[in-house]
Image (cartoon, grey):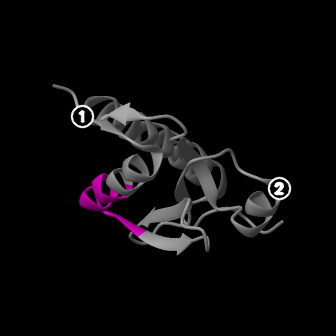
Amino acid sequence: MTVVLRPAEALARAVERLAAQGFAVVARNTRGDSVYLKPEACAFALRVSNHARTAKQRKNHPDAITSLVLRDPTSETALAEAVAVAVRNFAGERAKREGETGANGPSQA
């Protein structure tokens, strides 16, 4: 029998999985439906949420370079795959941006 996780449960499990991979929570909105995580000594964040980024979120967290959006109920297997894709996307985007700006994150030009 496959257990189906509601979006709030999936978000919490995704944060746990990311923490196990070296990401730490650096910000969370007051409703708890958007969480920003960064690897140690990294200028960039991975966002986990149940909705697309708003203009306010883009303004307040320009360091978020990848989002994992969990809107619908999902299985543990599908969640694990979604987290793996988000980590790969984050690593690719991080490498691209660090290559463009140096290892210390985006330039302030």
The vertical placement of 106 against 73, above or below, is below
Q: Residue furthest top?
A: 1
Q: Position of residue 101 (x, y in %)?
A: 65, 56
Q: Position of residue 89 (x, y in %)?
A: 49, 38
Q: Main secondary structure of the magenta part?
A: helix
Q: Quadrant of the C terminus?
A: bottom right
Stretch in magenta:
15-24
Viewer-nearest residue: 15 or 40: 15
Residue at left 61%, top 63%?
105
Residue at left 57%, top 47%?
50
Q: Position of residue 80 (x, y in %)?
A: 30, 37
Q: Position of residue 53 (x, y in %)?
A: 71, 50
Residue 18 magenta-drawn?
yes
Residue at left 58%, top 43%?
96
Position of residue 9 in the picture relative to residue 31 (left or right):
left
Q: What residue is pinned by disc 1?
A: 3
Q: Quadrant of the N terminus?
A: top left
Which secondary structure, mark 2?
A: helix
Mark 2 or 1 closer to N-term?
1
Q: Residues within 10 Å of mark 1 (few under 14, many from 20)?
A: few
The vertical placement of 107 against 72, above or below, is below
Three-letter code for the amino acid on which mark 1 is drawn: Val
Q: What residue is pinned by disc 2?
A: 55
The vertical placement of 47 against 79, above or below, is below
Viewer-nearest residue: 108 or 77: 77
